[in-house]
Each structure stands twice: as structure tokens, then as C-alpha cells.
Amino acid sequence: MSDEFQDIARRFRPLTFAAPEALDLMDDAAVIPSRPGFDLVVTTDALVEGVHFLPGERSDRIARKLLRTNLSDLAAKGAEPYGCFLAVSWPPHYDAKARDQFARALGEDLEQFGLALFGGDTTATPGPLTLSLTALGWVPQGKMVRRKGARIGDDLMVTGTIGDGYLGLMAAQVRLPMLTDLHNHALEERYHHPSPRLGLAKALRARATACADVSDGLAADAGHIATASDVGLAIDLEKVPLSEAASAWLALQDDPIAARLALMTGGDDYELVCTVPPDHRTAFIADAAAMGLTVGVIGKVVSAPGVSLSWRGQVQNVLTFGYQHRE
């Protein structure tokens, strides 16, 4: 096998797309120029084999999920993708073919979403496969959308559909035999290839008071907004949008409320949950539609702390949990 520097030159230098910031990946650092009138937004996510993806997962799927989960964080900030840094610790069972497959998929997604690789590091490990990606984005100065900022009376809104990531993992594990092949495929795609909602950046900056991406579960990530903003959130379970596949699964469950709670807390949806003043609701929905996205009103910002969930007018639970990162 070639050495680290040959691997970097062959697999990853093409992913810089000749960006001057990357210095051809010949140095131990990158140079990020200033951009007058803009703030640089920086976010980092890590993926670990057996924790964030299934053991032995295809490397092209891992590459796409790694980048897209980071871009979802940028989307929640209203930022425009700019570049990224990558660190990979390769175990022996990801051979040269798998590493080439990873680099090709990453390059395709970098080009699709309009950013370049600026640098990083590669190492060997006995396992598991461990990856970390740091994504950079630009946002007009002082306009980054934070989790803090929700105001009592704001609408709570969410993009797309919720619960597909949770069910997608089950589909990938062949645990949904009661669903059609079409539904299983759709759910698995949502799990492996999330779609960062970058097209909403301008609308979020103009109309949202707070935003978070839905990675740990809608209840938990909405709770992050509530905590940061020192407010509460009241969510109507009937209004949380579901996909056709998730609705089909829900119809087969004995306890529809418990099943809906599972979809709310499962995570891996990578949608955006945000708060929007009522007088901006119609315009925000129209902005999303112009980008080919749907957004739904699922609740309100209230004064009582926590996240309350209601079903047909009855409060079911107060949730502050979702996916928990254990030390």
C-alpha cells in the first residue's frame, strides 16, 4: 500500500478543486482569507463505525453521510457552504478499493454542494473506522441564526418529514418486513443520504428567530431551542409531518401515541426545526416552496419551560430527551 502522502495526493488532492486555501494539501495547514461583511461559521461532526453507522458499511455511503450531516448544521445557521477539513482513521477492513470509493463519493458531494476540501489528516487504526469533518460556511455579518432567539408566540415549524431516519436504520437492518420494498428503500435512503436543507438559508436569516437541525430527534433538538431561548415549546403530535412510508408503519402499530413518540425521538432526520413569528409564517412557507421544500407548523413557543407534546388536546408527556451522546 502506498504511504500517507501518496494516498493524500491521489485520493484527496483532487477534492480541493484547486482551491488556493488548500495549498495543494502540501502543507500542514490551510489559509482562510477574510471576507468583508461576512462571518465564518465553523462546525464539526464525527462518525464512528458501529455507533453512527453499521459495521462494515459501504464507504461511499459513509462519505456522503459524513459531509451531509455537517452541512445540515450549516443549514441551521443560515450559512453558505465554503470548505471543509477531513480526518480519517482507517482500519484494515477498509482496503484501498473502499478508500477510493470513499474519496469518489465525497468528491461528488463536495461538487454538488459547492465546497472544497482544504486539508485534514489520515491515520491507520486497528478499528473501528473513525471520521471527523469540519465544515466552514459564510453568513452575512451578524446574521447567523442561533438556537437562542425564540420568542413567546412564535410558530414552531419543521421542514420535510420526521421519523424517517429512525425507521431508515430499522430498514437498513431488515427489521421492517411488514412494509413494502418501496417503502423500505425510501426509508433506507433517508437514513444513508440525508438532504441538508441549505436552500432555506436566506429565508431563515430573514424570518426565523431560532433554528436547530434535527439530528438527535425532534423533541431533543426542539428542546435545545427552548433551553437556549429560555422558553417552552408546545408541540401537537397530529401536526408533525410524516412520510408515506412512516405513515404506513404507524398504521400497523398497536399504540399510535407511543409510536409517534418514537418517531419524535429517534433522530437522524436532518431536517430543520425553527421558530418563526406568525406574521412571517405565510412568507416563510412560500420561500420554502420556491426552493422545493415543505415546512409545517407543529406548535407554539410558550412561557412554560420544557417541550410538551399533546395528542388531540391532551398533554401526553414533557420531553427533554432524544439521542444521548455517552462519554
Image (cartoon, rainbow, N blue to C red):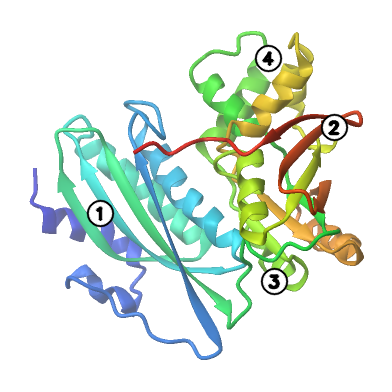
Mark drawn on residue 238: 2
Instruction: Please tell me whether mark 3 or mark 2 is closer to you in this view.
Output: 2
Left or right, 319 with respect to 16, comes to: right
Q: Amino acid at mark 3?
A: Arg
Task: Compute the Cα span from label 1 to label 3.
Answer: 36 Å
- Give the mark, 3 or 2, whose residue is nearer the N terminus: 3
Question: Which of 67/271 is in front?
Answer: 271
Answer whether labels 4 and 1 touch (C-beta < 8 Å): no
Question: Which amino acid does the dot numbered 4 rest on?
Answer: Thr
Quarter holding the C terminus?
top left
> Relative to 241, is 192 on the left or the right?
left
- Going from the N terminus, do you reach mark 1 or mark 2 first? 1
Q: Is residue 270 above or below residue 133?
A: above
State which quadrant residue 127 falls in.
top left
Badge 2 marks a residue whose secondary structure is: helix
> Image point 72% across, 48% down: which residue?
305
The kind of residue on which mark 2 rests is Glu
For disc 3, the marked residue is 205
Does the residue at mark 1 contact the one at mark 2 (Cβ under 8 Å)? no
Give how far apart the Cα atoms at labels 4 and 2 are.
24 Å
Q: Does the image show residue 271?
A: no
* Visible residue check, residue 309: yes
Task: Indicate the position of residue 225 as horizontal and vertical percent values.
Answer: 65, 54
- The residue beneath circle 1 is 11
Q: Position of residue 31 (x, y in %)?
A: 30, 80
